[in-house]
Image: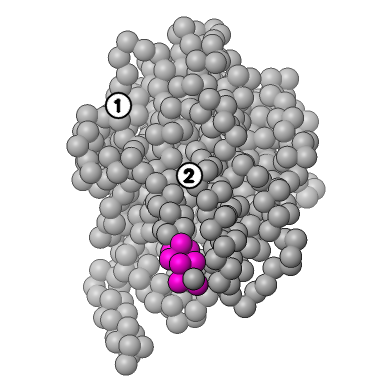
Amino acid sequence: MLFLCLCLILNLILASCGVRKSVKHVPDIKPYPLEIPKVNKINDSTFRFNQNYLVKNRQQLWELYIKGNALQLGYNNGALTQNLMQKQEDVFFSKVEGFVPSKFKQNLLRGFLKWYNRKMYLNIREDYQAELYGLSRYSSDRYNFIAPKFLRSMYLHGAHDIGHAMQDLMMVGCTSLAVWNENTEDGNLLIGRNFDFYVGDDFARNKLIELVEPEKGIPYLSVSWPGMIGVVSGMNREGITVTINAGKSKIPLTAKTPISLVTREILQYAKTIDEAIAIAKKRKVFVSESILVGSANDKNVVIIEVSPDNFGVYKVENTSKVFCTNHFQSEAYKNDKRNRKQIAESHSEYRYEKLQELLQENKKVNPVKMAAVLRDRSGLKGEKIGYGNEKAINQLLAHHAVIFSPQKKLVWISANPYQLGEFVCYDLNEIFSGKKPVNGTMAKSELNIPKDPFLDSQDFKDYEEFKFANAEISDAVNDKTLELTDGFIPYYQSLNPDFWLVYSQAGKYYFNRKEYSRAKTEFEKALSKEITTVPDRENVEKYLKKTGKKLKGQW
């Protein structure tokens, strides 16, 4: 009966007029002249079409240079990155399949997505729709059962927003900061950011640096992944920078403009902070997000704070530094209940305080010092809080880290893994002057920042092993039929001994097997560590209380 009811509801949803229109919608591409790309494969890491190219540099970062009208940009992007983009689709949709293994529930999810995204195309610029259409021509045919290629490409651009809004996943617990005047070595503006978006190591493997010269607007650099035309971290030739940090959202009723397309529009069309604010203000978003905007022309930084029903701008007075984590700071959100809860319960305020501490220690910041801030793994006052703790600036899961010098038009981008690899430097003045790549790359290698020595340490090797061990114990916690070997838990805990999670997981494992005395010891150890959030601490406390009751019952 439940099955029939759900199917009936799904059919009613799909039969609605709004859904039918959106599913059949195709953008108008007639205004755009098009030359179908014929890609010349020079080797496995170099591809060209006219002036457009894709090359992998020695740090294993892919560099994509494309130019043309909106439709041509999409085609050029898709033709050059087709293999990478299809791999990225495989990774993403396999993750979704892992979250929702039931075929029946997958069908329901597809129906829900079509309904939920029914108004998205009404909120995306027509030129971006044309670009997405061109890009989507090179998508895989394997996933046509989910949605037609163009719609699927739009859905993927809203995936960050949807996951953030629907489940409050906080897969993006990002940190960004800006300093200038007396706080930098040369007085110029310097901005750093960690994009702590983690969908697995496979998703982060093929980082893509997009160097885009659109027919209309301002050329720009963006750091993301294949198949993405939106911007999560980027700078344009005018020295406008954008980075996004997630805030606390309520569940919206329908998808509107993906935040990455709002920031893309800012990069492509804004030369000043005021122009960036005007663009953000006119777009309807469906999640809460902080957009840190730096400007060479203004020599200033603001945080634009957007949500479905509110808008604020945070400007600092009488200081030359700005910090941004995952809570709002403008007057517009002063009494916002969700924002106050975010400050009280999440790790956002802790990282904000850690930034203040690090800036006290690192006077006169330069790019090398900024990289050190972004790579910092300690807690407040240098406390060891465990590797992977989201209270750290460096949570050891970042998709990428970026450093911007807007006035000099320089950008440094971290190579894998996380923000530990070499920071590769790019000069936007050179790139968009028509200069050809040197030795197959556009990087200004003499200004690169060396990799973090931590990368070669035993602690890092242990952390990488910890991730595998953590997945194994998580399976055993969720499935009581799985038994771990006698020495597994001590070994697992030795890999990351300062992290509260290794003791909480052990406690849950013992609790599920009615070994309450051992569980109690582990939960008490967990509570002695720096636990990531208030709900996490409350969960451990609840387990400890339940364990105590079980032990009393045994007597």
Where's residue 500, x and y in %?
55, 47
Residue type, label 1: Tyr
| On screen, residue 551 above or below 439 | below
Q: Image point 73% across, 20% down: which residue?
A: 446
Q: Which of the two residues, 254 or 509, is positioned nearer the viewer here? A: 509
Q: Quadrant of the N terminus?
A: bottom left
Where's residue 451, x and y in %?
72, 30
The residue that mark 2 highlights is: 532
Q: Is residue 450 left or right of 183 when viewed as pictured?
A: right
The residue that mark 1 highlights is: 314
Q: Main secondary structure of the magenta part?
A: helix
2 vs 1, front mark? 2
| On screen, residue 81 above or below 5 | above
In the image as oriented, which residue stretches furthest toward the bottom? Answer: 1
Q: CA distance from mark 2 to mark 1?
A: 27 Å
Q: Quadrant of residue 27?
A: bottom left
Local secondary structure at mark 1: strand
Inspect this view and state whether residue 216 appears.
no
Q: Quadrant of residue 238?
A: top left
Where's residue 508, x and y in %?
54, 63
| Crowd around label 1: few <14 · some 14–19 · many ≥20 (10 Å) | some
Membership of 431 in magenta stretch? no
Q: Is residue 167 left or right of 84 when viewed as pictured?
A: left
Q: Image point 78% across, 36% down: which residue?
A: 456
In primary-sequence order, the first of circles 2 and 1 is 1
| Crowd around label 2: few <14 · some 14–19 · many ≥20 (10 Å) | many
| On screen, residue 185 above or below 549 | above
Where's residue 364, x and y in %?
54, 10
Q: Image point 67% across, 72% down: which residue?
A: 483
Please report the bounds of the magenta region as a residue range: 546-554
Inspect this view and state whether residue 303 appears.
yes
